[in-house]
Amino acid sequence: MKIDKKKLAVIMGLVICVSLIGLAAGVDPIDSPIVIDTEAEDLEVTIYNADLGVVKEYRAKYIPAGVNNVLYEGVASRIDPTSVRLKAVDSVIEVVEQNYQYDLVNRDKILKKYIGKEIVAYLTYGDKKEMIEGTLLSYRGDQLIMRDKYGMIQILDSNNLVLPVLPEGLIMKPTLAWILNVTESRNHTLELSYMTSGMTWNADYVVVTSKNDSKLDLNGWVTVTNNAGTTFKNTSLKLVAGDVHRVRDELFYTSPVYKEIQAPRASQFEEEALFEYHMYDLQRRTTLKNNEKKQISLLEAADVDVEKEYVYDDIRNWWWYGDDWSDTGEKKVDVWLNFNNSAENNLGIPLPKGTVRVFTNDKEGKLQFIGEDSIDHTPKDETISLFIGLAFDVVGERTQMDFNKCANWYEYVWAVNLRNHKDEDIVVTVVERTSGDWEITEENYNHTKVSNNEIEWQVPVEADSESTLTYTIRYKRW
């Protein structure tokens, strides 16, 4: 067959003109999408205390020049689509449109899309199966109702069902769908960052005290929870400690502002300041599986100086000063462990908030649990106080001894009896809660004014003995 070259040139020219006119008019990109389903070449996850993770990953894919449909699979199902940021590392790509597809496949969704369409089901008789072709009318639970090719209504088990194709619109993985305008046909390295809920972390500490409660060893662990809806393989991991502001139910994230500080003595993490927070950077890669809790060692510190403090604080039976007064019957004495988070005390590490569980060794050298408390985010060089429990062998009792009143003042006389049934001398801190314009007019131990609302006395009590604190507090009436 002889080809007319002039006619062929005219036809090709018309095709090119139509293509250019269509592109200029903004026609839809090519129907066949480019699927990016490979694992990330590099991945970083930053997790906050408040149900927030920030993901940054890099994937490479050949994308031709022009307007393309691109499906980016495997993002977290709890992604915040408004936080997505995509850019090409080594080229120019314009994001024309973005959609987040999360209609994941399951049985109910498949059957819903097949109502009114032809399906194949099987009726089971023992070890035999009979194939039934027909139209799906409805379904509920494990039962299907269909009309077979003879017009008969069949009620069948949905477990014996064959469908020809996956209905349109259902996907296997959470997917970002983009329309990208690409300037150059080549391998493009894409940098994707986004925020997701379903990720959090918290710290847990184990303290072991020495025999005389003067030293302690501290071990810190972080527990990372990933319920974001995807697995993050071989990722770098950063944990941010601090109270990050979030706007209502929306996610809020501030671009990192770093400054260098001295690294702590942590076994796997390096700590640095991040804006007004602290960040702990794991010095190796790890995998965060979906719906998994992972524990990682945070820090170790030994031979930390600690002080055991006995506190008699009558706040449990809070009293109201006035013309009438009733004695309190509280006899419990609190036990606290106080230590300084300083480098001189073998610490000096900003400690994220968490639960502290305290153990000690019995006479056989076996660890026994003695109490737990929680701490807030604690900077270095601050004192940490742990409420451990109530003393068994130390009793406190407070009694009102007198009350006097005149035109412009009234005063109370109190006695606090402290009984020590231990075989060692102790000191008990007695706390008085007050307010208004007051003064101590008499006392047998010197007080310390902690604030206008709190007064303290340090009362020594010898072994198997008792001591009594007496004091008079006077209030101005106006």
Image (cartoon, rainbow, N blue to C red):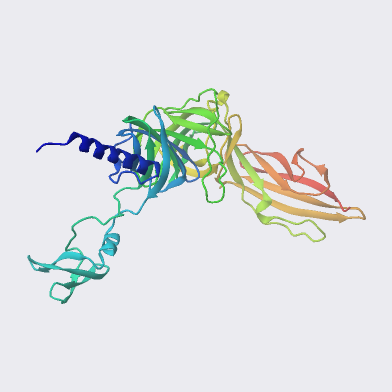
Q: Is residue 281 above or below residue 356?
A: above
Q: Is residue 398 above or below residue 134?
A: above
Image coords of residue 228 (percent x, y): 39, 46
Q: Residue at x 58, y 32 (%)?
A: 379
Q: Is residue 321 above or below residue 427?
A: below
Q: Nearer the viewer, residue 217 or 160?
A: 160
Q: Nearer the viewer, residue 466 or 59?
A: 59
Image coords of residue 57 (percent x, y): 38, 34
Q: Nearer the viewer, residue 342 or 353?
A: 353
**Residue 140 position by quadrant:** bottom left
Q: Nearer the viewer, residue 361 or 56?
A: 56
Q: Is residue 373 above or below residue 213?
A: below
Image coords of residue 321 (percent x, y): 78, 56
Q: Residue at x 72, y 40 (%)?
A: 457
Q: Residue at x 50, y 36 (%)?
A: 240
Q: Is residue 68 visible?
A: yes
Image coords of residue 267 (percent x, y): 42, 27
